[in-house]
Image (cartoon, grey):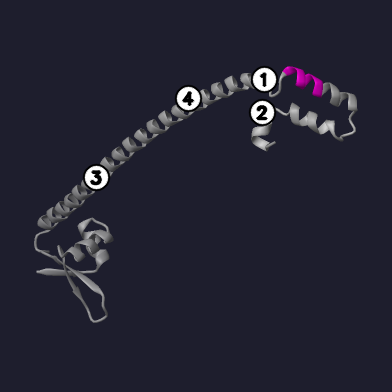
Amino acid sequence: MLERLTVQQAARQLGVSEGAIRMRLSRGSLEQEKDDNGRVWVLLPGDNSDNTDNTEHHAGAHTDGQAEIDSLVDVLRDQVTYLRDQLDQEREARTEERRRHDTIIAQLTQANAALARKVPELEAAPDLPPEQRESSVTSSSEQGNDGVGGGRQESEQRRSWLSRFFYGP
């Protein structure tokens, strides 16, 4: 004899959630019936003559539901373990990448310092023979700082090669 129950009543009787009942209905593992109003009725075997059998049925349904929950919990634990492993690997990779970047920055800093030490040497390197350089500096300083003529030549000659390289002649 089949007992006609609502989804809520069937969930209480089987000891599972309403969502579990709906899933079982959609999978076809529970029988269902719709009335004229569109309401869904769950059809469960109902043997009211023997209460002990009914109690055992409830315990079996509860055990089945608990087994399903336990299997889902195990799956979720496996996924959490996998994601934690992935996170640890990503952290290790980022740490290694930071070390590599720090090494590159240190090497570039050393190279920059070495080049900075050479700049005064390169600026002191004569573009003109020393006699012409001294005479042009002396003649322009004798002319005064009126900003005309020799003052411009002096500034062009005194500009470093680095300045000429970046800003042009």
Q: Is residue 142 magenta?
A: no
Disc 1 residue type (three-letter):
Ala
For the C terminus, the image quarter is top right
Disc 2 residue type (three-letter):
Trp
Of the numbered discs in the image, which one, if any, rests on residue 161? 2
Q: Is residue 48 above or below residue 58?
A: below
| Separation of marks 4 and 1 at Cα, in angstroms | 33 Å
Q: Which residue is mark 4?
A: 103
Q: Which residues are magenta?
A: 130-136
Which one is in front, 99 or 92?
Answer: 99
Disc 3 residue type (three-letter):
Val
The local secondary structure at tag 4 comes to: helix
The residue that appears at 26% across and 78% down in the rendered structure is: 38
| Separation of marks 1 and 3 at Cα, in angstroms | 74 Å
- Which of marks 1 and 2 precedes in the sequence? 1
Of the numbered discs in the image, which one, if any, rests on residue 125? 1
- Which of marks 1 and 4 precedes in the sequence? 4
Quarter residue 152 falls in: top right
